[in-house]
């Protein structure tokens, strides 16, 4: 039989079984094709989502920074070090204000540290999935739930470094929220466990725990533990410049100036161009009254280091050093530079710890303070105050302590403190009960956390260097009790004297200087009071000085 003749222009199908004529294509269901496409899309989305999740869990995290900071940030986090740690003097029901260590943008890497892939030989390998779940709760600010999860892991694996670290992070956040020192103490124990008591701890985990331990222990007033943590931290990371500097600062905060000096000198052997450490070496030498050697170190700091140039106190130390070397004009050049970069309002007012928007004037009248009635009542009792002061001064046991703030060029200057940082010295007040009763009626003085109330005795031949007080938050009143001839005080460019039974008030954040060129001892009562422009609720929030 003959095959049917092909139509004109018709192409042969490659396979008869697969040939579809035009009528079949016209009748194909369009909804069926759409459903097929949707299935493919859904499948692709699921596979993509799973791959992202796996990568999120297992991808190694960049650990160049600690506590959410890179090396540059860590440098800027190192405090001056010359400042005494105030938090241990704060009410013990409070914890330190600080950025969250687990929920901020910067803190993300620290949380994900707990999500890093865990090697098979790591003690946390068996519980890695549970640690990730607890960590996700932590980052979601579900701190109580996270704490329960970490505790559950520890009940099964008591030596889990990541669970102990996670427990510490959760407790630290809860301590801040609840203002609970019990939580804070438990947090410190958790970090201490990771830092010192566990074996086979991942280096990144240990470093983070030690850094948090040093910070929280210092705040809690556990200075020895804080130093121990800092030392171990530096031992673990000896090439970390920021940690090296932080250890030196911690020595200073703990009052270990000699050890700090030795440490900073060793830091400079490793990093000779470290102007931050040079400034701290200069500060320690300044405190040791080694002004000539201190000066080049201090100048390097204030001229070269960006962080030091943000700290008013280093300009104060440098200027004071120049003053003590009798280079006063150069000292004022340093102060002018500080004014230029916005650290001081003018060359006279140079206190480092200040509140903004307070009236700044060298001399005050009682009426300007708003405390005039209380001041008048206090001054009217000056003879009672004088008699108690003389009684303490004349006893062989004394009780007056030498001025120890390195302010005297020569001579003898002693003080007998009744109130300091808003707290009464009960032992001394038992010896001067009437004076303390009078101060108790002056709450703006008795509660002044940034000042003192004290008897001050200055002997003939004394000269007090030009200096400023530490803060603009207070005003200082002198009540003249025993005033011989030949004594004067300069505040900015005005010189005045004392009178028995009279009082004057000045802002000691302005430069002042004292000369005693008389022949007998001078006795005054010094009363610091809150600056009247600081609201009462703000006064409660300020740290003691």
Image (cartoon, helix red, strand yellow):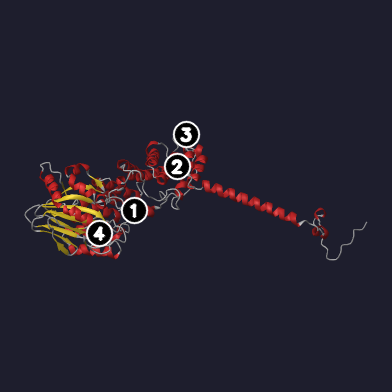
Q: Position of residue 108 (x, y in %)?
A: 46, 50
Farthest-out residue, right? 1
- Nearest to the eye among marks 3 and 4: give it: 4
Q: Is residue 122 above or below residue 474?
A: above
Q: Mark 1 to mark 4: distance in Å?
A: 18 Å
Q: Which residue is mark 2?
A: 166
Report helix, strand or loop for mark 2: helix
The numbered mark, 3 or 4, whose residue comes first in the sequence reads 3
The numbered mark, 1 or 2, whose residue comes first in the sequence reads 2
Q: Residues within 10 Å of mark 2 (few under 14, many from 20)?
A: many
The tag on residue 155 is 3
Q: Position of residue 196 (x, y in %)?
A: 37, 38
Q: Which residue is mark 4?
A: 369
Q: Left or right: where does residue 377 sit relative to residue 173? A: left
Q: Which residue is mark 1?
A: 537
- Nearest to the eye among marks 4 and 2: give it: 4
Q: Position of residue 430 (x, y in %)?
A: 19, 42
Q: Mark 1 to mark 3: distance in Å?
A: 45 Å
For the N terminus, which image quadrant?
Answer: bottom right
Q: Residues within 10 Å of mark 4 (few under 14, many from 20)?
A: some
Q: Left or right: where does residue 317 sit relative to residue 244? A: left
The numbered mark, 1 or 3, whose residue comes first in the sequence reads 3
Q: Do tag 3 and tag 2 residues touch (Cβ < 8 Å)?
A: no
- On the question of residue 115 being in view, the answer is no
Q: Mark 1 to mark 2: distance in Å?
A: 36 Å
């Amino acid at each position: 039989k003959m095959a049917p003749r092909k139509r004109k222009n018709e192409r042969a199908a490659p396979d008869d079984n697969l040939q579809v004529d035009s009528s079949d294509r016209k009748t194909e269901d369009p909804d069926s094709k759409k459903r097929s496409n949707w299935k493919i899309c859904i499948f692709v989305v699921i596979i993509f989502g799973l791959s992202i999740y796996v990568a999120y869990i297992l991808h190694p995290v960049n650990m160049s920074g600690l506590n959410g900071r890179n090396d540059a940030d860590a440098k800027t986090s190192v405090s001056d070090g010359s400042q005494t740690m105030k938090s241990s003097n704060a009410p013990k029901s409070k914890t330190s204000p600080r950025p969250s260590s687990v929920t901020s943008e910067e803190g993300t890497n620290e949380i994900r540290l707990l999500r890093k892939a865990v090697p098979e030989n790591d003690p946390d390998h068996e519980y890695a999935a549970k640690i990730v779940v607890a960590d996700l709760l932590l980052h979601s600010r579900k701190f109580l739930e996270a704490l329960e999860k970490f505790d559950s892991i520890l009940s099964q694996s008591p030596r889990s470094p990541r669970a102990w670290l996670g427990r510490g992070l959760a407790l630290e956040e809860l301590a801040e929220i609840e203002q609970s020192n019990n939580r804070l103490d438990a947090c410190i124990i958790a970090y201490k466990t990771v830092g010192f008591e566990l074996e086979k701890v991942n280096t990144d985990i240990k470093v983070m725990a030690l850094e948090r331990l040093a910070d929280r222990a210092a705040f809690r007033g556990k200075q020895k533990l804080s130093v121990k943590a800092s030392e171990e931290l530096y031992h673990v990371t000896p090439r970390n410049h920021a940690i090296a500097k932080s250890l030196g600062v911690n020595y200073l905060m703990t009052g270990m100036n000699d050890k700090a000096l030795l440490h900073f000198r060793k830091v400079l052997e490793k990093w000779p161009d470290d102007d931050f450490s040079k400034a701290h070496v200069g500060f320690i030498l300044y405190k040791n009254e080694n002004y000539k050697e201190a000066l080049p170190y201090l100048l390097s700091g204030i001229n070269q280091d960006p962080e030091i140039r943000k700290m008013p106190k280093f300009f104060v130390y440098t200027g004071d050093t120049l003053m003590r070397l009798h280079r006063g004009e150069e000292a004022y050049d340093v102060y002018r530079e500080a004014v230029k970069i916005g650290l001081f309002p003018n060359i006279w007012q140079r206190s480092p710890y200040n509140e903004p928007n307070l009236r700044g004037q060298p001399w005050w009248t009682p009426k300007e303070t708003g405390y005039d009635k209380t001041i008048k009542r206090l001054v009217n009792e000056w003879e009672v105050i004088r008699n108690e002061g003389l009684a303490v001064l004349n006893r062989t046991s004394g009780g007056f302590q030498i001025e120890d703030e390195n302010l005297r060029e020569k001579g003898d200057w002693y003080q007998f403190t009744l109130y300091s940082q808003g707290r009464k010295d009960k032992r001394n007040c038992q010896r001067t009960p009437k004076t303390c009763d009078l101060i108790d009626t002056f709450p703006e003085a008795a509660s002044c956390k940034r000042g003192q109330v004290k008897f001050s005795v200055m002997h003939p031949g004394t000269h007090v260097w030009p200096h400023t007080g530490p803060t603009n938050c207070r005003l200082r009143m002198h009540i003249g009790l025993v005033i011989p001839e030949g004594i004067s005080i300069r505040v900015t460019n005005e010189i005045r004297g004392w009178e028995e039974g009279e009082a004057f008030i000045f802002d000691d954040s302005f430069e002042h200087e004292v000369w005693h060129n008389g022949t007998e001892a001078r006795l005054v009562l010094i009363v610091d009071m809150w600056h009247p422009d600081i609201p009462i609720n703000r006064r409660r929030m300020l740290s003691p000085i």
